[in-house]
Image (cartoon, grey):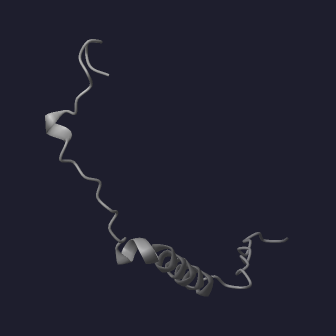
Amino acid sequence: MGLFKDTPPSEHPDYTQLRFMAAGSPSWWKQHRHKVLAVGGLLVGFWLAGHHEATPNTCTPAATSSSAR
């Protein structure tokens, strides 16, 4: 609808040449980032697990220096 009711609607001259563009194909990173992050997470997990000792070292109590008389 035009600005006034007595004028018929017309196309805007600046926007008549616009065309929709097809979406381009995603980059390699966008296609494979979930796989890269999953493998990276597994590697970090294995690295952290390799630095974890199965049995924790227990603290030995310090020898007391009390003299029994």
Left or right: 47 with respect to 11? right
Q: Position of residue 26 (x, y in %)?
A: 37, 71
Among the 4 quarters of the image, the one containing residue 32: bottom left
Q: Nearer the viewer, residue 67 or 42?
A: 42
Residue under the image location 73 percent in, 78 percent down: 58
Left or right: 19 with respect to 64? left
Residue under the image location 63 percent in, 82 percent down: 52
Quadrant holding the C terminus? bottom right
Q: Position of residue 37 (x, y in %)?
A: 49, 75
Q: Residue furthest left?
A: 13
Q: Position of residue 22 (x, y in %)?
A: 33, 62
Among the 4 quarters of the image, the one containing residue 10: top left
Q: Nearer the viewer, residue 7 or 25?
A: 7
- Note whether 56 is above or below 9 in the view shown: below
Residue under the image location 32 percent in, 22 percent down: 1
Left or right: 35 with respect to 29? right
Q: Nearer the viewer, residue 13 or 37?
A: 13
Among the 4 quarters of the image, the one containing residue 42: bottom right
Left or right: 10 with respect to 22? left
Residue under the image location 59 percent in, 85 percent down: 46
Total numbered labels: 0
- Note whether 24 is above or below 38 in the view shown: above
- Note whether 4 is above or below 51 in the view shown: above
